[in-house]
Image (cartoon, grey):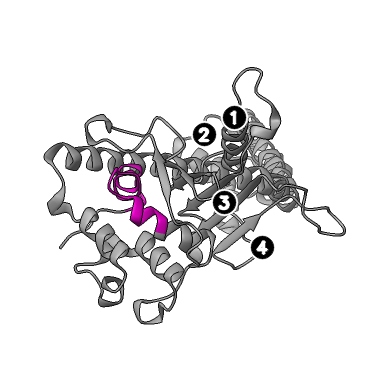
Amino acid sequence: MKFISPKTDFAFKKIFGSTDSQDILISFLNALIYAGEPIIQDLQIIDPYSAATVSGLKDSYLDVKARITGNKTVIIEMQVLNVAAFEKRVIYNLAKTYANQLKIREGYPRLQPVIALTITDFEMFKEQPDVISHFVFKEKDKLFDYPHLQVEMFFVELPKFKKQLDELTTLTDKWIYFLKNTPDLETIPATMETVPELEKAFQIANEANLSLKEFEDMEAQEMAIEEQRGIITRGVEEGLERALEQALEPALERALEPARIQAMQEGIQAGRQEGIQAGQRVLILRLLERRVGAVNPDVVSRIGELSVEQLESLVEEVVGFSSLSDLMVWLDRAE
């Protein structure tokens, strides 16, 4: 068998939001919200998944929405990419769902509790190791609950779940393992077959049971997710590169300043030396022309090879030369 990934919007809705997925969703929600206790006995999926309407990327941030026992509404989102302001989006969707219960002129007593269940394929709360986090309204110092608690948030961070198949002991473990590892499996694990709702979820996730259009939609979403992941990764890399450059540039400037100053000084000194040498060569050639006549190219070349000190010495000697032979003797001696 080959299974589709429950982490894509398409697959998540098909598995948990179909018209015949109520039993699957009840088991799933009891596992993640109520630690496996059978608190939810019945539910109604709102706007259930329809294969004919699924295409491309999701146009809603809510993957599945249901009304459960106790007249509570649960909004469920599976999020693969860590996009900007995602933590704010979760609160916005929760608040919007809570507020939209009321129509014009309806009173606040009609408001019913709303639970936001968010599953992420990335870590949101790096400061704590728990896979599941539960947020409610509490008084800051005394930690007592706000009266008539109406909104709650549950987060499931898949990267923090490290258990292997032989370590799964609870219904919660099994459902989280299903979410994280289903695409890597080739058969339904024996430990999963003992839970009818899980076994049914695997059957829905079997690629062989997809229509051609569903398969194409799934592939389109997976490709789009990978493209977005690449864009985000490249953006992060470029941001880190810029930040590193900005952080290192002043340090490099400070570190390189002494070397730069020394190089500049050496360059100036070298330039000065070359200027002196060129000036002395011109002076010597003029003096020689006056004293002994024209100087052949060989002699000019040999004079060009002399050091500054030798040129300075030659300037003093030229005055005493009476012929080119005197100059040649001096040059031979200088070598």
Q: Is residue 81 visible?
A: no
Question: How busy is the neighbourhood of tag 4: few (under 14 within 10 Å), some, or many (20 plus)?
Answer: few
- Measure the alpha-carbon separation of dots 2 and 4: 86 Å
Quadrant (top left, top right, bottom left, bottom right) of the N terminus: bottom left
- Residue at the right extreme? 141
Name the residue nearer the viewer: 83 or 90: 90
Query: Could you tell me which secondary element the residue under label 2 belongs to?
Result: loop
Amino acid found under the numbered disc labelled 2: Val
* Mark 1 in CB contact with mark 2 (< 8 angstroms): yes
Mark sitting earlier along the chain (2/4): 4
Identify the residue at image location x=26%, y=71%. 193
- Measure the alpha-carbon separation of dots 4 and 1: 87 Å
Q: Nearer the viewer, mark 4 or mark 1?
A: 4
Mark sitting earlier along the chain (4/3): 4
Measured from the top left, where is residue 189 in percent x and y?
26, 73
- Measure the alpha-carbon separation of dots 1 and 2: 7 Å
Question: What residue is disc 4 on?
Answer: 127
Q: Is residue 45 magenta?
A: no
Name the residue nearer the viewer: 22 or 107: 107
Query: Could you tell me which secondary element the residue under label 1 belongs to?
Result: helix
Q: Residue 231 lies in what quarter of the image? A: top left
Name the residue nearer the viewer: 280 or 230: 230
Q: Residue 295 got which mark?
A: 2
Amino acid found under the numbered disc labelled 3: Leu
Question: How busy is the neighbourhood of tag 1: few (under 14 within 10 Å), some, or many (20 plus)?
Answer: few
Q: Residue 331 got which mark?
A: 3
Q: Going by the image, does 261 lie left or right of 297?
A: right
Question: How busy is the neighbourhood of tag 2: few (under 14 within 10 Å), some, or many (20 plus)?
Answer: few
* Mark 1 in CB contact with mark 3 (< 8 angstroms): no
